Amino acid sequence: MEGAAIVISILLAFAIDAWWDERKDSKFEDEAILGLVDEYEGHVRSLQIAKDLHLRIHRAVASLITACHTGTYQSDEFDIDQATFWLLVPPTTDLGSGVLDTLMSSGQIKLISNKQLRFQLTEWESVLDELKDDEQNGSKIVHEIVAPYLTQHGVPVAYTPSTSEAIVDAPIHVAERKLAMDVVAQKNLLSDSEFLSILELRYTRLAHTTVEFNRVTSAIDSILTALRTSIDR
């Protein structure tokens, strides 16, 4: 009987330890999920801001393409200097993933009990990388093709859409040049087939990046749904 009591006490101690460990793991998982919800809700807001900027650039490029086809620039949203400015902007999206990075680097991602959610979280970075790669390709087009073309052809690019912050602190002899004020420069630019080809390249790449934005948005929505379901379990 004494031996049996010892065995029972040992088994009970193991059971208590296992129960305590499981309880700690469950508490950690709950806290991790709440942290991930906050993180991905922040991603939703940040991604929307980035996507709005991206679509603005896309519309600006479209307005320039239309002008090339018609020979006259007309847009209710941008003047020609604003459109040219946005053509030169190469945005990048950096959402950051502090909570997820910590879980991944520490190996504690395994404590997320929902297998599908765990898979989505481990695949998240690869989905985001597709968007980043697309944006980097767009940036290369801006720096290696668009900017050299505009500077080589003397197209005014020192203008910014919100007044003229870029030259406010410049020496007094530096004057702002606007494409809208130079009819000849406008005509030459809009009739140049090389410029149209550059615009079409930029437009096509931007359209593909929109697809990647939508993929990232869909991934975030799916992850948030799984996270909230885990909270309600």
Image: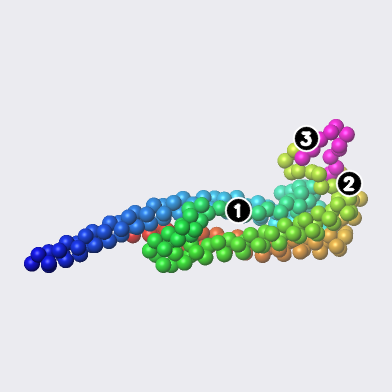
Instruction: Tell me the residue at 54%/50% (across/down).
Output: 45
- Report the span colored magenta: 166-179
What residue is drawn where x is 73% and y is 51%?
89
- Badge 1 crowding class, 10 Å Cα cut-off, few under 14, some 14 to 19, many 20 or more, is some
Quarter residue 2 falls in: bottom left
Give the distance between the C-alpha atoms of the residues marked 3 and 2, in whole angstroms. 22 Å
Q: Dot 2 corresponds to which residue? A: 182
Secondary structure mostly seen in the magenta stretch: loop
Secondary structure beneath dot 3 equals loop
Q: In which quarter of the image is the C terminus?
A: bottom left
- Which-is-in-front pick, marks 3 and 1? 1
Task: Report the amino acid beneath label 1.
Answer: Asp
Q: Name the residue under label 1.
A: 94
- Marks 1 and 2: which is nearer the front? 1
Q: Where is residue 61 drawn, in percent x and y?
A: 75, 56
Q: Where is residue 123 in the image (x, y as percent from the top left)?
A: 52, 65
Q: Is residue 113 left or right of residue 154?
A: left
Residue 70 visible in the snapshot: no
Considering every residue shown, the one lying at the far front of the view is: 3
The residue where tag 3 is placed is 168
Give amino acid for label 3.
Val
Left or right position of 110 against 76: left
Magenta stretch: residue 86 in it?
no
Indicate the amino acid at tag 2: Asp
Residue 148 visible to the viewer: yes
Q: Where is residue 226 in the image (x, y as percent from the top left)?
A: 43, 61
Residue closest to the eye, 74 or 99: 99
* Residue 173 covered by magenta stretch: yes
